[in-house]
Image (tube, helix red, strand yellow):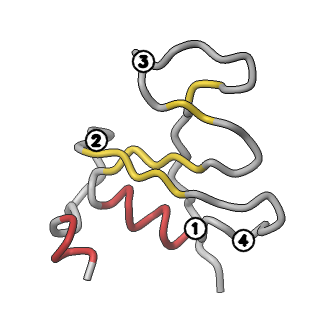
Amino acid sequence: MLDKILGEKKAAQDGKTTFSAIISSAKADEDHPRKSVVRAMHHRGAHVISTERSNKRTSVNAPERDDYSPAEGLAYPEEQED
């Protein structure tokens, strides 16, 4: 399904991103986002961001707010869940 929506999986990771994938996640859910989902997004060229445990802003043109911070991308998880 992801191939149809986002494009086919890249043969190799080149570090270049073509879109942002923002995953809204609750503080109480330690397993969200799933590593398999983060890996799948990376394989399709996404800059993956999770909102977990913080307030994020994704635009460099967004106004400064004391309670928000720039959105850092999630690293590619080398391992997967069972």
Nearest to N terminus: mark 2 or mark 4: 2
Sooner in the amino-acid sequence: mark 1 or mark 3:
1
Q: Residue at x 20, y 75 (%)?
A: 3
Residue 39 image position (x, y, % from top left): 45, 64
| Relative to 2, 52 lies left or right | right
Q: Residue at horizontal 28%, vertical 51%?
A: 45
Residue type at mark 1 is Lys
Q: Are marks 2 and 1 in contact (CB under 8 Å)?
A: no
Read off the residue under disc 4: 31
How far apart are labels 1 and 4 at the CA level? 8 Å
**In the rendering, at what x and y percent does residue 44 appear?**
27, 59
Between the C-alphas of marks 3 and 2, the distance is 17 Å
* Residue 19 image point, x, y percent: 28, 45
The residue that mark 3 highlights is 60
Q: Which is more foreground, mark 1 or mark 4?
A: 4
Helix, strand or loop for disc 1: helix
Name which of mark 3 and mark 2 comes first in the sequence: 2
Closest to the observer, 51 or 67: 67
Q: Is residue 68 left or right of residue 1?
A: right
CA separation, marks 2 and 4? Answer: 24 Å
User: Label 2 is placed on what type of residue?
Assistant: Thr
Disc 2 vs disc 4: Cβ atoms closer than 8 Å? no
Cα separation, mark 1 vs mark 3, equals 27 Å
Considering depth in this image, is 16 or 55 the residue closer to the camera? 55
Query: Counting other residues with Cα less than 10 Å from the Cα at mark 3, is it few (<14), some (14-19), or many (20 or more)?
Result: few
Q: Nearer the viewer, mark 3 or mark 4?
A: 3
Asked if residue 21 is positioned above or below residue 43 in the image, the reply reads: above
